[in-house]
Image (cartoon, grey):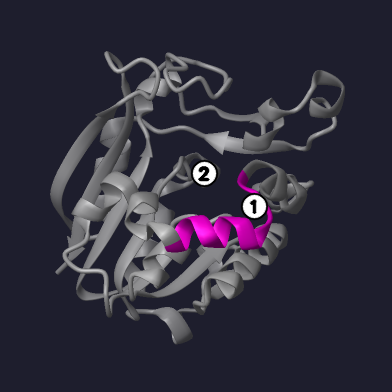
Amino acid sequence: MVDYIAQNKRAWEYNAYDFWCSHNGAPAELAETLKADPLRAIRRHAVYFDAIKGMRVANICGSCGKKAIPLALMGADVTVFDLSADNCRYATEVAAAAGVSLDYQVGNVLEIDMTRYGGAFDVVFMEGGILSYFHDIREFMGVMHGLLRPGGKLICSDFHPFNKINDALGLEQPTMSYFSTEVYESEMAHARFYEADVRRNFPKCSHRKYTVSEIINAALGASFTLRRFDEHPAWFKPELPGEFTLVAVRE
């Protein structure tokens, strides 16, 4: 069986640092933008936090730090868990330029050291389409539950499962039956920003997309108490669902 986590790590370390520099600007440039208005960078997710200042936040698959660093600027103690060393390099350089500290842990999210991080967080936060990178959502939700202290909150924002049957967000990802349980390969997220001759060289990621019921039932099965489930319109097709946010609590 192919190690899909290792496969996804290879994809997310392929040219990632250079991509972030070209897409977001040099670390110092992004740092100035985030410092100027950190709340804007959190956008609609801010409403799901009861408080930010003083909170200990785990940012799952936090990538280049575009959410973790604003949270830190607003007074949170943030730890990022991500598998890409390139993402870590960019994010830590941005954080340093912004004058905030960031605990960035590079590795398999499913193998987080629970002797160090178990029950350590007030909030576990993720966004931007990460669930499909994990082939067993029940295992994933169990790890998220283990990271939270009793009373801690899970904020899981992701691409809406409607995107399984319609590329409503324009991410150029394959579509399939809504109820498909297929594991499939597709381009990593950055590839679509490059010309075809460069694009074809990008390593492929391994995905498993979920239905709404699979996501909710995985959270319930991990002993979370569901607080709310919001659906958000697609960016360029607001008549279609594009994203969702699930909020749940570890009792």
Q: Which residue is mark 1?
A: 5
State the quadrant of the N terminus: top right
Task: Assign the magenta stretch its main secondary structure.
Answer: helix
Residue 93 appears in the picture as rendered = yes
User: Quick check: 111 left or right of 166?
Assistant: right
The reply to whether discs 2 and 1 touch (Cβ–Cβ < 8 Å) is: no
Residue designated by label 2 = 135
Q: Position of residue 27 (x, y in %)?
A: 65, 60
Q: Amino acid at mark 1?
A: Ile
Residue 83, relative to residue 169: is it above or below? below
Q: Amino acid at mark 2?
A: His
Q: Is residue 157 left or right of residue 3?
A: left
| Quarter of the figure with residue 193 | top right
Looking at the image, residue 210 sits to the left or right of residue 2; the answer is left
- Res 106 visible: no
Q: Which residues are magenta?
A: 24-35
Specify whether residue 28 is painted magenta: yes
Label 1 environment density (alpha carbons within 10 Å; few <14, some 14–19, many ≥20): some
Q: Nearer the viewer, residue 64 or 217?
A: 64
User: Picture coordinates of residue 8 (x, y %)?
Assistant: 67, 47
Please say if 202 is above or below 71.
above
